[in-house]
Image: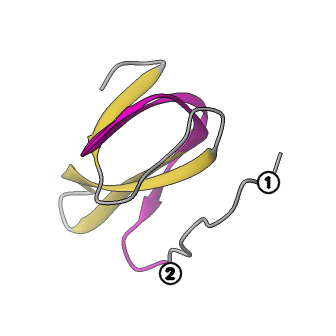
Amino acid sequence: MSSTGILFTTDRELTPGRRVELAISWPAQLDGSCPLKLVASGRVVRAEPGRAAMEIYQYEFRTASRTFAASGGDRP
C-alpha cells in the first residue's frame, strides 16, 4: 500500500481499467475504542492470477459499524 495505490490478493479475475472499491480493516481505533476501515476506490492498473494493483482515486476512513456494499461492475 502506498499513498497512490494498493496491491491486493483476489480470487476473481480482474481486468485493467475496472473500477474497484476496497474496504480494509485498519489496525488503529478511533478514540482507542471504535474500529475503523479504510475504504478506497479507484481502477485496476495491473492484474495477474491471484493478485491485482489498483490506483487510488479516493479514500476515506469509516467506522466499522457502517455497512459496506460490494462494488460490482465496470461502471465508468
Vertical placement of residue 2 versus 19, above or below: above
Judged left or right of residue 5, residue 20 is right
Q: Earlier in the sequence, mark 2 or mark 1?
A: 2
Determine whether the residue tagged by mark 1 lies in a helix, strand or loop: loop
Instruction: Describe the colour scheme in one phrase.
Output: secondary structure
Magenta highlight range: 41-66
Percent coordinates x, y for residue 28 in the rendering:
19, 49
Percent coordinates x, y for residue 23 in the rendering:
41, 57
Looking at the rendered image, the quarter that the C terminus falls into is top right
Q: Which mark is residue 67?
A: 2
The amino acid sitting under disc 1 is Arg
Picture quarter containing residue 7?
Answer: top left
* Magenta span contains residue 62: yes
Q: Residue at x 53, y 71 (%)?
A: 70
Give the mark toward the camera: 2 or 1.
1
Vertical placement of residue 74 versus 33, above or below: above
Q: Which mark is residue 37?
A: none
Percent coordinates x, y for residue 6 in the rendering:
37, 30
The amino acid sitting under disc 2 is Thr
Residue position marked by numbered label 1 in the rendering:
75
Q: Residue at x 18, y 58 (%)?
A: 32
Residue at the far right in the pictured view? 76
